[in-house]
Each structure stands twice: as structure tokens, then as C-alpha cells.
Image (cartoon, rainbow, N blue to C red):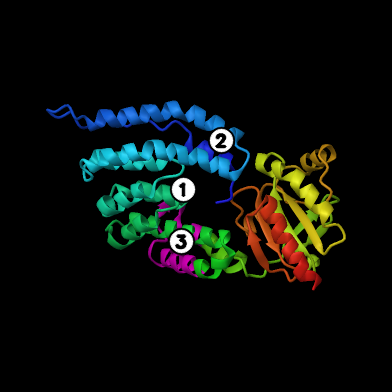
Amino acid sequence: MRRWTGGLLAALFVAVPLLAADKPADAKGDDRAAQFKKVQEDYLKAVPDARKALETAKTPEDRKAVFQKLNKEFAPRILKLVEADPKDKLSFDMLTWATQALPDVDSKVFDSLAKYWAKDEKIKDLCRRLSMSPKEGTTKLLQKVLDDNSDKDAKGLACFALAKAAADKADKDPKDATKASARAEQLYERVEKEFADVKLGRDTLGNQTKTALFEIRNLSIGKTAPNVESENLDGKKVQLKDYKGKVVVLDIWATWCPPCRAMIPHEREMVKKLKDKPFALISISADAKKDTLTKFIEDTPMPWTHWWNGQTGGILKDWNIRFFPTIYVLDAKGVIRYKHIRGPELEEAVEKLVAEAKK
């Protein structure tokens, strides 16, 4: 997932509450509940240092190392405690705590949940979390819930999470986009048919699936991008279709978005490097007021095309934009070739498509 690490900080490093111990120590003093509480306490002590390391990390590899360090320190301790009695409620609590607390969860945690808890009604809450934010290594668990659990809500949420994970894979890997998109579409269609009334927050899986299917059928890698209508800084109507013949990077962003702002220096260099080439960078602002955008550009030079969408409607609604920045890279024929890439990876992709366009 190529999203702002700050979102991970907010989601993963919020204080995970200590779970109440519900199993007394046995005659040998082997108190697993007390040991689990100690793991949680140690984790909360480790979080500040992890947060600092993450905030100062300069590369994706550095950030990944921070996540892996947390996982290597705490996942083995949890798994060892679970081994003593993997079927008791305390083990379930420990495993689900690990899925919330650890940003890079050991796949063995999910494997244990799949083996011992996939049929249990308690797995529903975890499926709900995974349906909103899929994690790597969960496919086996989610598929087993979908196949073996008797609870309709759990099955529906598992199916939706599997679909979302497949769709994410299609966005990340152009080589596997067709296969992954087909898998996601198949799963979403099953959600639509069997689990449309299952609740997800204040919405239903049915409503969520409609927008997801639109993305797959119209905005997947390899699809011709739908036309976009917006307005430029002079208030004039503009359209994406007018840029046919050029490689286009659509950057849907907002001035208040830190990772969006972090992209600006590189975007500036990329635009300068590709001057007079068949290329256009179009930044579409989701700021509530156009004045916010124009004042920002006055102070921060961004010498490329700018459109203003506002914070609702337009491309935000039509393309189901869920996070900022959202990046689409179109070739000269208007076909979506890459999604959600930044930095050197973005520049490399653009140069490749520009070379194609010149031919």
C-alpha cells in the first residue's frame, strides 16, 4: 500500500488498551494472562521510540525496518504464549491484539487464527477491521472464514476484505493487474449477490461494493481513463480528454496533506526535466476554497497545470478517491498504466511512457 506513513502512525500507534486478564494463575504459577499483560506493557514502552524512528526515517526501507523491529520483538512472545493453549479465549485475545498492535504482523499470527478460530463468531470483529484495511498474510484466514464460518456477517466481511486485498494487489503490480482485478471483481460480485445487506460502519457492503466495482471496471490498470471535467484557476472548464497525445500524471491532492507537499520538490524537478516533451502533470486540488490553493502556489512554486475540484463531488466522487495523494499515470492514448506511485518510481514510469509516445 503506497499511502502516507502518517496514517499508519495514527492507526497503529494509538495506545492499544491492555486486555483484562480472565484466567487465573495455575498451581505452577504459570500465569499466561500476567505474561500477556507484561508483553502489552513492554509494547507501550517501545512505541515512543518506534514513533521517533518512523518520523525520522528517510526511505521506505528505513520505515519498513521500524515495523519489522516491532514485529520481531513482540510477535514471537505472543506466539509462544499461544502455543500453550491455542484454543482458549486468552489466546484469541492475544492473537487479535497482535493484529492491532503490530504494523508488520507475522503471518504465523494469522495462520494460528485461521487454524483455531476461523469458525468462531468472535472472528467477525477482526474481519470487519481487515475489510477496512487489509493486511498482508491474511488471505488464508479470510478464505477459511468465508468457507467455514456459519455467521453471515463474518462471511460477508471476509469476502469483502479478500476482494479489497485483490484490488490493492492489482493497483500495486501492473504485471499481475489483469488477474488480480478479475479476482477482485469476482469476489465483489459475490458480496453484491450474497452479502449486500451486511453492515460496515454506517454503510452496507452493497453500497461499498458498487463504488469498488466501478473502480475495477473503469479505473484499473489497462483501462482507458474516463473523462474528467473540472475548472482551472481562472474558473474555466477543463477536460482530461483534451490531453490525449500526452503522457499525463493526475495528482489528486490537497494543500493540507503532508505527503502531498513532500512530493512537490521532486515533481518540480520532473516537470523541468520533461519540458517540451509530450507530458503533462495535472494536480487536482481537493481544498475547500480555491483561494487556499492559489495562495499556496504563490508561496510554493508549482509550475505545472492546476485544477480545483473542491472537497466534494467531481473526481473525488466519480473516481471514489479515498486517500491523498492519489496518483494515476496515463499513456498518450489515455490508458491507465500505473497507479499510486511516487518519487523515482513515478519518474521512471513517466520516462518510459514518454519514450513510447515519441515513437
Q: Which mark is residue 163?
A: 3
Q: Is residue 263 left or right of residue 320?
A: right
Element at label 2:
helix
Q: Is residue 292 left or right of residue 189?
A: right
Q: Is residue 105 magenta?
A: no
Q: CA distance from mark 2 to mark 3?
A: 30 Å
Structural crowding at the residue carrying mark 2, measured as other residues with C-alpha within 10 Å and reported as few (<14), some (14–19) or many (≥20): many
Amino acid type at circle 1 is Arg
Q: CA distance from mark 1 to mark 2?
A: 33 Å
Q: In this figure, which residue is indicated by the disc labeled 1? A: 202
Amino acid type at circle 2 is Leu
Give the magenta-colored segment's residue range: 182-209
Q: Are marks 1 and 2 in contact (CB under 8 Å)?
A: no
Q: Position of residue 311 (x, y in %)?
A: 68, 47
Q: Are marks 3 and 1 in contact (CB under 8 Å)?
A: no
Residue at (49%, 40%) from the top-left corner?
Answer: 67
Element at label 1:
loop
Q: In this figure, which residue is indicated by the disc labeled 2? A: 54
Q: Position of residue 172 (x, y in %)?
A: 57, 58
Q: Nearer the viewer, residue 108 or 222?
A: 108
